[in-house]
Image (cartoon, rainbow, N blue to C red):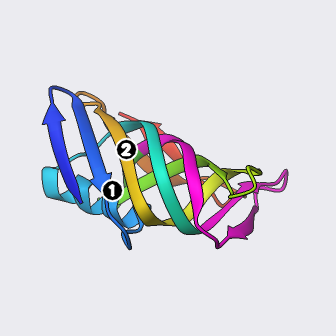
Amino acid sequence: MEWTVSGEDIFVRLDPGEEIHASLGALADEIGLNAAAITSGIGRTRENVYGFMNNDGIYIKRQLTNPSELVSLSGNIARTEDGNPFTHIHCCWSDDDNNVHAGHMFSSTVAVVAEIHLRTLTHAIMTRCPLPDVQLLGLRFS
């Protein structure tokens, strides 16, 4: 991973074998990032696990194991109540037949490269907290 900062913007390049959630969490710890918007991401990834939350608040997972084009990525970075970085990301991939796969990203490993833009929220405090009856950790603002 390499990254650069320009004002409130961080641009990150992830390399083959790096998992996106783990890499962005490590970056947040390295630079002391507590709140950020993930505004865009492109590249080529593999071993993608994605899905959606159903009406009962339960995540349904799907796998896209073959390398695919990362067409769009967005979300945010916050901290959990115990101070760990938490990335919430949604993605859209295109497989080699141009079929689109999209949803909540559980994991995704870089196959060729991933280029991701973050916007630091320097004056915001965002904490991820359990919500009743759903698997999602909700955002709390202070």
Residue 25 in magenta stretch: no
Q: Label 1 crowding class (10 Å Cα cut-off): few <14, some 14-19, many 20+?
A: many
For the C terminus, the image quarter is: top left
Our reading of the magenta stretch's main secondary structure is strand
Residue identifier under label 1: 24
The residue nearer to you, when weighing 130 against 50, is 50
User: In the rendered structure, which segment of residues is drawn in magenta?
Assistant: 48-76
The residue under the point 77% across, 51% down is: 99
Q: Are marks 1 and 2 in contact (CB under 8 Å)?
A: yes
The residue nearer to you, when weighing 95 against 107, is 95
**Residue 45 seen in the figure:** yes
Q: Label 2 crowding class (10 Å Cα cut-off): few <14, some 14-19, many 20+?
A: many
Which sits earlier in the primary sequence, circle 1 or circle 2? 1
Residue 138: percent from left, percent from top: 55, 47
Locate residue 65 relative to residue 98 in the image: left or right. Answer: left
Residue 3: percent from left, percent from top: 19, 48
The dot on residue 116 is 2
Of helix, strand and loop, which one carries label 2? Answer: strand
Locate residue 136 relative to residue 14 in the image: left or right. Answer: right
Identify the amino acid type marked 1: Leu
Q: CA distance from mark 1 to mark 2?
A: 9 Å
- The quadrant holding residue 110 is bottom left
The residue nearer to you, when weighing 128 against 10, is 10
Residue 139: percent from left, percent from top: 49, 42
Identify the amino acid type marked 2: Ile
For the N terminus, the image quarter is: bottom left
Q: Is residue 53 above or below residue 63?
A: above
The residue under the point 74% across, 67% down is: 62
The residue under the point 37% across, 66% down is: 22
Of helix, strand and loop, which one carries label 1? Answer: helix
Residue 70: percent from left, percent from top: 55, 50
